[in-house]
């Protein structure tokens, strides 16, 4: 076993471990941290493939910008992992989750099986690697020509998520301030009655 194979195995195990722990954690901040760990391990895999630009983008853009944005939204919403978000789910929702989980397990088994069983026609792998694979020109050409609409849609979704988090936070803060402001008014008649009774 050479050094490249050892680095690949370690990076793959760390990436899968980070993704699994991200799902298993109830604390959203810890989930984001494990997601960063998984993305860094995936960046190492991209560097091993010779796609240096994709590896750098994965760390700079996703780990350094997008996930920091996730942390900002989590802290803005004041999520601590104690919220029971799955409580009161409908039976059809639970059935859908169960079916999707089974499908994902079968898909994972199929992927692992195709990786260990060799065939004449490779499945899911490139037979020949392009010369400009992972370069800035190749990524930019695909991103701004063939995949320009999904790229812009992803930006709109992120913007909508930020605006929605801010609106939800402002509404909750406004409701708390209204409750605090109305509390003294409700207690004022009681105070006046007590002072009138003493006189």
Image: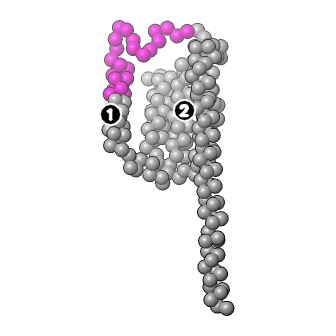
Q: Residues within 10 Å of mark 1 (few under 14, many from 20)?
A: few
Give the percent coordinates (x, y) of residue 119: 34, 11
Q: Earlier in the sequence, mark 1 or mark 2?
A: 2
The vertical placement of 170 against 128, above or below, is below
The vertical placement of 33 against 171, above or below, is above
- Asked if residue 114 lies in the magenta stretch, the reply is yes
Residue 59's quadrant in the figure? top right
Instruction: Kindly identify the residue that appears in the image at 62 percent across and 39 percent down.
Output: 162
Give me the disc on residue 198: none
Give the percent coordinates (x, y) of residue 62: 60, 32
Relative to the observer, which residue lies in front, 131 or 167?
A: 167
Give me the disc on residue 99: 1
Q: Which residue is mark 2?
A: 39
Instruction: Kindly identify the residue that appears in the image at 61 percent across and 74 percent down.
Output: 187
Q: Could you tell me which secondary element the residue under label 1 belongs to?
A: helix
Relative to the observer, which residue lies in front, 45 or 88?
A: 88
Q: Is residue 48 visible?
A: yes
Magenta span of residues:
105-130
């Amino acid at each position: 076993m050479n050094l490249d194979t050892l680095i690949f195995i370690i990076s793959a195990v760390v990436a899968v471990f980070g993704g699994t722990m991200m799902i298993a954690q109830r604390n959203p901040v810890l989930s984001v941290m494990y997601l960063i760990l998984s993305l860094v391990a995936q960046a190492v895999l991209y560097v091993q493939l010779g796609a240096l630009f994709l590896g750098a983008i994965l760390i700079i853009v996703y780990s350094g910008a997008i996930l920091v944005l996730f942390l900002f939204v989590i802290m803005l919403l004041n999520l601590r992992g104690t919220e029971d978000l799955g409580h009161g789910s409908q039976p059809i929702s639970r059935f859908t989750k169960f079916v999707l989980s089974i499908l994902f397990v079968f898909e994972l088994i199929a992927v692992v099986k195709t990786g260990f069983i060799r065939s004449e026609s490779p499945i899911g792998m490139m037979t020949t690697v392009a010369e400009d694979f992972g370069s800035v020109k190749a990524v930019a050409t695909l991103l701004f020509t063939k995949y320009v609409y999904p790229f812009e849609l992803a930006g709109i979704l992120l913007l909508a998520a930020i605006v929605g988090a801010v609106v939800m936070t402002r509404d909750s803060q406004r409701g708390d301030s209204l409750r605090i402001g109305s509390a003294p008014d409700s207690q004022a008649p009681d105070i006046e009655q007590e002072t009138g009774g003493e006189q």
